[in-house]
Image: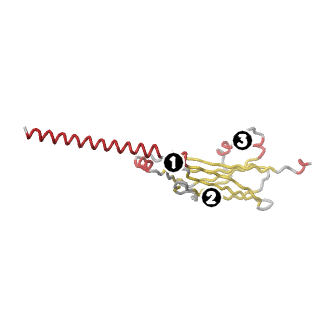
Amino acid sequence: MAKFLKTKEKEIESVKNIFETIALFIAAVWAILTFYIKDAPELKGTASTNSEMTIEAVDAKKVHINYFVTIKNKGKSEFEVDGPTMVRLWLIPIDSVIHEKHIEWEKYLKMPSIDTISSQALTSTYDPDGEINEGFDFFTNDDPNVAVLAAIDVNFKQKSHWYQFWKWFGKEESRPDYSFSTKMRCIPDKKDQK
């Protein structure tokens, strides 16, 4: 009988160990889901891409277009800009945009640009509150009656611990984003001013 009770005690101890292991595993999953997913901000809400543009005459025939870009991390987890960023430039005849009631710049973004710069300058890991500013310079013939459109294409990749966990299982994803700025250059003819 004592042998039977010892055998049952060992079986009960084994079952207890199995249940404790399962409970620890469930607790670990709960902790990951509660803290890493619930508290980790979405990538879409953390990355901020802003841009602005200036145009200055170099001489009577050339203009300098400076396209200034800022990428800032406004979240609590780091992310990285994946691969080179593409900065593109369009010069759109002013007559094609001033007759529209609403200018849809996105339709011009789908057209071929007149110039493109591929740059690694913004490719980096961005810590919370981190930012990088970079200017891109274009020189073009002066056309006083154009709309200038410049855009940057960026791919963001999340770098949180949870994201790295999914990366091991082939779930690596990057999120494309873009920002653009426009300026109109419209100089009336002297004959129109009379």
Q: Nearer the viewer, mark 2 or mark 1?
A: 2
Residue on which disc 1 sits: 174
**In whole angstroms, how far apart are the C-alphas of marks 3 and 2?**
27 Å
The foreground one among 193 and 13 is 13
Q: Nearer the viewer, mark 3 or mark 2?
A: 2
**Image coordinates for residue 194, horizontal then vertical, percent:** 92, 48
Residue on which disc 2 sits: 134
**In whole angstroms, how far apart are the C-alphas of marks 2 and 1?**
22 Å
Q: Looking at the image, which residue is at 65% across and 52% down?
A: 51
Around disc 2, counting alpha carbons within 10 Å, would you say few (fewer than 14), some (14 to 19), or many (20 or more)? few
**Image coordinates for residue 6, horizontal then vertical, percent:** 12, 41
Q: Looking at the image, which residue is at 61% across and 58% down?
A: 133
Q: Amino acid at mark 2?
A: Glu
Query: Residue 115, located in which quarter of the rendered image?
Result: bottom right
Q: Which mark is residue 103?
A: 3
Mark 2: secondary structure:
strand
Mark 3: secondary structure:
loop
**Do the CB atoms of the residues marked 3 and 2 lie less than 8 Å apart?**
no
**Do the CB atoms of the residues marked 3 and 1 lie less than 8 Å apart?**
no
Around disc 1, counting alpha carbons within 10 Å, would you say few (fewer than 14), some (14 to 19), or many (20 or more)? some
Query: Residue 63, located in which quarter of the rendered image?
Result: bottom right
**In whole angstroms, how far apart are the C-alphas of marks 3 and 1?**
30 Å
Outermost left residue: 1
**Image coordinates for residue 36, horizontal then vertical, percent:** 44, 46
Quick one: quadrant of the N terminus?
A: top left
The foreground one among 39 and 188 is 39
Q: Amino acid at mark 1?
A: Ser
